[in-house]
Image: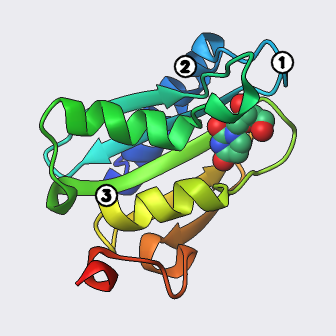
Amino acid sequence: MIVESKDNMDFERMFTLSLEALNNSYSPYSKFKVSAVLKTKDDRFFIGVNVENASFGLTNCAERSALYSAYSQGVKKENIEKMLILSSSANIISPCGACRQVMAELMDRDSVVIMCDLNKNFKLIKVKELLPLEFTSKDLL
Ligand code: THU
């Protein structure tokens, strides 16, 4: 019997969900499909894709779509464990600046971001490493 580690099982599940979700990307302008799968500590998965608009600036990235979906369904940041990001390009992509700001606020600082390509090569980074000196609610005081 092959004993798979929990991390490997999570990766396989998240990769499969992400690969399927690329089909849902609404990206008629860039033709660049992105998906993100967020996993909670209690093993729930939330999917996001990039959703573009003819008014380009209104585009929502996959990472923010996944986070807003999770929050809309009641997920709290303490319960977020990791997020996998995949695109239709050959390369690993990393989250844009706008998404980093949102991730810094809505994800647990120690949660993990898995930046992945279609061949399952990946890089890992923690949310707290994504955006040094981020603007936070404390700055509003
Ligand atoms: N995009 C994402 O969804 N996530 C990223 O991390 C980078 C970029 C989207 C936005 C746009 O729909 C397309 O990719 C090209 O920039």
In the rendered structure, are the residues bearing label 3 and label 2 in contact, judged by CB atoms less than 8 Å apart? no
| Residue for badge 3 | 106
Mark 2–mark 1 Cα distance, whole angstroms, equals 18 Å
Q: Is residue 55 found left or right of 60 in the rendered image?
A: right
Image colouring? rainbow
The residue at the point 72 percent across, 52 percent down is 121
- Vertical relation: 127 (above or below) 88: below
Labels 2 and 1: the sequence-earlier one: 2
Q: How far from the left and from the top, in percent, is residue 28?
A: 79, 12
Question: Is the distance from the Cβ of mark 1 to the nearest ligand 1 atom less than 8 Å?
Answer: yes
Horizontal side of 17 relative to 9 (left or right) equals right
Give left or right: position of 26 versus 88.
left
Tell me if label 3 and label 1 are in contact, CB under 8 Å: no
Quadrant of the rendering where the C terminus is positioned: bottom left
Looking at numbered disc 3 in the image, what kind of residue is underneath it? Answer: Leu
Q: Nearer the viewer, residue 41 or 95?
A: 95
Locate residue 53: give its quadrant: top right
Q: Nearer the viewer, residue 112 or 78?
A: 78
N-terminal label among 3 and 1:
1
Camera-near label (3 vs 2) is 3
Q: Secondary structure at mark 1?
A: loop
Q: Which mark is residue 29?
A: 1
What's the residue at 28%, 74% (across, down)? 137
Ligand 1 found in image quarter: top right
The residue to which callout 2 is attached is 21
Q: Amino acid at mark 2?
A: Ala
Residue 32 position in % (x across, y down): 80, 27
| Residue at 56% in and 17% down | 20
Q: Residues within 10 Å of mark 1 (few under 14, many from 20)?
A: few
Residue 39 position by quadrant = top left
Q: Is residue 108 above or below residue 38?
A: below
